[in-house]
Image: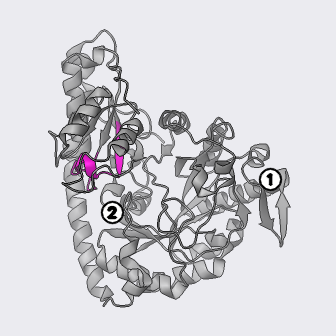
Amino acid sequence: MDLKVLSQSGGCASSGCGSSTDRLTHLPEAIRAKVNNHPCFSEDAHHHYARMHVAVAPACNIQCHYCNRKYDCSNESRPGVVSELLTPDQAVKKVLAVAANIPQMTVLGIAGPGDPLANPERTLETFRQLSEKAPDIRLCVSTNGLALPAVAEELCKHNIEHVTITINCVDPDVGAKIYPWIFWNNRRIKGRKAAEILIEQQQKGLEMLVERGVLVKVNSVLIPGVNDEHLKEVSRVVKAKGAFLHNVMPLIAEEEHGTFFGLMGQRGPTNAELQTLQDACAGDMAMMRHCRQCRADAVGMLGEDRGHEFTLDKIETMEIDYASAMARRAEVHAEIEANRAAQREQTGETFVSLSSLKRNLKPKSEPRPVLMAVATTGSGVINQHFGHAREFLVYEASAMDVRFIGARKVDLYCSGDTTCGDAETALQKTIRTLEGCEVVLCAKIGYEPWGQLEAAGIAPNGEHAMEPIEEAVAAIYREMAESGQLDRPKAEPQRMSA
């Protein structure tokens, strides 16, 4: 995909340049409309719109070495985990309740905790009811793809506009290291043969959906030493077959999750390894970098989970007037779109300013790029206290553009005014998570974290509170360039005590 040049004097030449929707302008208007307010398909939309998943699909037809499903867990935030399994009727009632109370919600997805298409009756019944009762909600499904060809036609009858397929390989020898077995034609098949069948069905399903005008996102789990180099070929193949977006996600392999990879000591990728591979896969295909690897019952904006507000017992007591809710949602969405348009216009001017750095400064060489971490609760602005952040969004600024790199989760450092500064270990973990970043932008920050960040070579910055993220990142980068900071190597951090 060729990106629109940000200015006549320079611009972004690869996918992933910030969260500007300019990267989608080459697409037909009908497709852009489908993506515009979809937080999982648009980097910009995830700042403004919410999504939810309903857990109606408990069974799965394959086993992955990185998966361990949990059906009654509220403590973990990863795919395959839910607090409550729902019937289709319960799921529909929950969707109506969430949509009535969170007007930013635009998307309903079914992603597990098993595979939605291994449970086709429950999945399709949920979609059937929602297409009638909540016509303003976009419907999505995520699948491993094994059963996709058999139900692709039926999915399209239920107004499914977006499908995500998890494709970790296109080589059965690689697949045999990831999938111990599949359940196919009423029997369990193992080893290379299982991977061969799965890959064939995934590719066939992808082609069928593209032929029917469905937008397809491909998820791939990056497993160091197993499929890390191979994912470049996966990206090439799925792009050639019409996939719209590729999401390369890090393996979650902590031992406490009980997965095969976790118990066997398989490590996940570093942030630098993930970014390097995402950049290598990008080329002219859009890469998704804002994935949060959500629970199968996630509710709210990406990066937050409000599912505890909408348990079955709480939903039973809610009075829902969905007609009024739809009208209110339309008003909220119109306001969001007006704000987004204003931000794009303002940020576009900043990009032009950045692209002139090389001419104005005339450095001996092009200023090096800089990673900056941002604390935000959403809406595309810097609006969160450093100590209240559960994740930081990481952006890369260069002389040509600002681009979103990804999100890094952290433990909560400060839970209130009286506890800020007490959680020394959590602060040190946060600083290690921000490794590679030279600046952290937040609304406020305390004295202790300020000092420890500086000691680690990360400059705290609270001067751009409530400003659009990309505008603030670009402004700081320009200041760094004009002061000569970018002519010098990144400062080495002081050694932190354990």
Q: Quadrant of residue 101?
A: bottom left
> Which numbered circle lies on residue 49?
2
Instruction: Please say whether residue 123 is one of the residues in the magenta stretch.
Output: no
Name the quadrant of the C terminus. Answer: top left
Q: Amino acid at mark 2?
A: Tyr
**Local secondary structure at mark 1:** helix
For the residue labelled by badge 2, is the local secondary structure a helix, a strand or a loop? loop
Between marks 1 and 2, how big is the CA–CA gap? Answer: 38 Å
Bounds of the magenta segment? 375-395
For label 1, count other residues whose C-alpha is less than 10 Å away and answer few (under 14), some (14-19) or many (20+). some
State the mark number for residue 62: none
Residue at left 54%, top 73%?
72
The residue tagged 1 is 196
Give me the residue at 20% from left, 65% from top: 335
Q: Nearer the viewer, residue 204 or 185?
A: 185
- Asked if 465 appears above or below 84 in the picture, the reply is above
Outermost residue to the left: 463
